Amino acid sequence: MIFLDNLINGLSLGSIYAIIALGYTMVYGIAKMLNFAHGDVIMVGAYVAFCGLQYWGLPPVVAILASMAICTVLGITIEGLAYRPLRQAASLAVLITAIGMSYLLQNVALMIWGANPKSFPPTFINSTTFRLGQLRVSSATVITILANIVIMVSLTLFTAKTKMGKAMRCVSEDRGAAELMGINVNRTISVTFAIGSALAAIAGVLLCSSYPILQPTTGSMPGIKAFTAAVFGGIGSIPGAMLGGVLLGVIEIFGKAYISTELGDAIVFAVLIVVLLVKPTGLLGKPVREKV
Amino acid sequence: MSEKENKSPLLEVRDLHVFYGAIHAIKGISLQVYDNEIVTLIGANGAGKSTTLNTIAGLLKPRQGTIELIGQSLGGLGASRIVPKGLSLCPEGRRIFQQMTVRENLEMGCYTRPNSEIADSIADVFERFPRLKEREKQIAGTLSGGEQQMLAMARALMSKPSILMLDEPSMGLAPILVEQIFGIIAELHEAGTTILLVEQNAQMALHVADRAYVMETGKITLQGPAEELLHNEAVQKAYLGS
């Protein structure tokens, strides 16, 4: 029973990692950059939802939508102001800018909301606990896992079927050739950031529904874990982000439960190192041919 | 020629200068392409042929000079905004979308046109490239070199361009496939497509083209009817290996 309990908790945590990892993996696949500020967009999303619920008295669904809308605008703004001017610059410059953006967001959050942790209010997401015999599953767990599945299916359909989704795949594969098709590369990258950031808002709310402590650094560790998950699954691959995220969550919870609570994170990263040694492109990643 | 000089060109490039950092790659070239002709740019490796095409297509920004398509300036427009104006480049090395199917590649070629036109356009190119129809659902990266070249050309035609620019379509292909590709170029010409062709295979290019420009180190050194250049001693010595 404890095993099942841990498994379900692992799947739930892993689903949150997977949703965050999608943002990393889509941006990496299409804009060819690591957006280290992504974890902090999660934090902003959680704070906006928190304000909506706590101060503005919004119904939970409206608060979540507001949080998604603001994160979408934030993502597009970050991309347009900080990353777009560096499109032709060395990737190291972009990386440093992303790290700077991460600190900027954390410190702005510190100025607005202060350093004291806020307690995320309960919503419909974590309102009930289901009982299956001896097994107790919180509704947050169920909703998180379902949300992950719905998001994965929608994104897979979006990239496979829609015009914008296909344009994203083209930009991801060959930016110059995509331009020659008449695809507006900047707009495509903006849309990618918009989707990633909206997902970050959802991840922020789900994260705080299961772990209701909110502070300006709330997004960093899940952000880094989700980045690890994206690399683990094969960065640039949407199913890879899902697989990597879920596996990482399960490994983390099992590691903490059966090996050592303190070493939980170390175990996660040790598994990553082993996977990358055996398969450097990640579980589902494809080897990329370097263009001459 | 005299008849053509009275008409205004479809594509007119004047005094184009392109730099790669400090390197002056294109040093003031001018060229015209008239309706329904094949014009070829020939020259050695590094002469600036591809750079010229990439600049016209908007992938590179010229430092100086003008590019006009049907009297409209393309100055400063990026590649994605030039395509809907009727100019399509089939780039060097094909650059098809390897992970997409043949059909998806063709659909992307139609990106700037209304969705309602996709089916008709695909039917048109399948008629010209029946091999692609057989491979419709195949992942493009698994096609043979010749098929990939056909796909790249078909994809470039999907936007129904006024001018099709082909960059080294015969590169890396077996001689029999080279013949096939040039056969297709001739067919497209007969069907009324205007083509600007860059080729290292000067022999084949001059046979299929109406007019030609010879480029050397970023400049045009010779120009004229293809037939004439084919018999020009300097051209024969430098590019035709005789």
Image: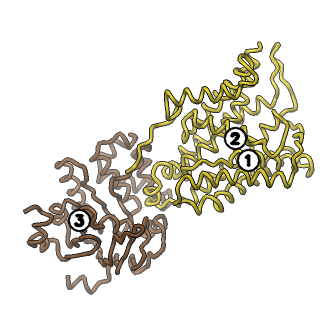
In the rendered image, the vertical position of residue B136 relative to residue B41, given as above or below? above
Amino acid under label 3?
Answer: Glu
For label 3, the residue is B190
- Identify residue for label 1: A40
Chain of the residue under label 2: A
- Frontmost residue, B59 versus A180: B59
What chain does mark 3 sit on? B
**Subunit that carries the residue with mark 1:** A
Rendering coords of residue B236 (x, y %):
10, 67
- Tell me whether circle 1 and circle 2 mark residues in contact (CB < 8 Å): yes
Looking at the colours in the rendered structure, which chain would you say is drawn in brown? B
The amino acid type of the residue labelled 2 equals Gly
* Mark 3 Cα-neighbour bin, 10 Å: few <14, some 14–19, many ≥20: few
Please determine if labels 1 and 2 lie on a single subunit.
Answer: yes
Identity, as a three-letter code, of the amino acid under mark 1? Asp
Residue ID at (16%, 71%): B226
Q: Secondary structure at mark 2?
A: helix
Asked if residue B195 can be seen in this view, the reply is no
| Residue count near mark 2 (Cα–Cα under 10 Å), binned few <14, some 14–19, many ≥20 | many
Mark 1 or mark 2: which comes first in sequence?
A: 1
- The picture's colour for chain A is yellow
Q: Is residue A119 left or right of residue A285?
A: right
Residue A109: horizontal and vertical position, in percent? Answer: 81, 52
Give the CA separation, mark 2 to mark 3. 59 Å
Relative vertical location of residue A284 with respect to residue B112 in this rendering, above or below: above
- Dot 1 lies on which element? helix
Residue located 36% across and 59% down the image: B157
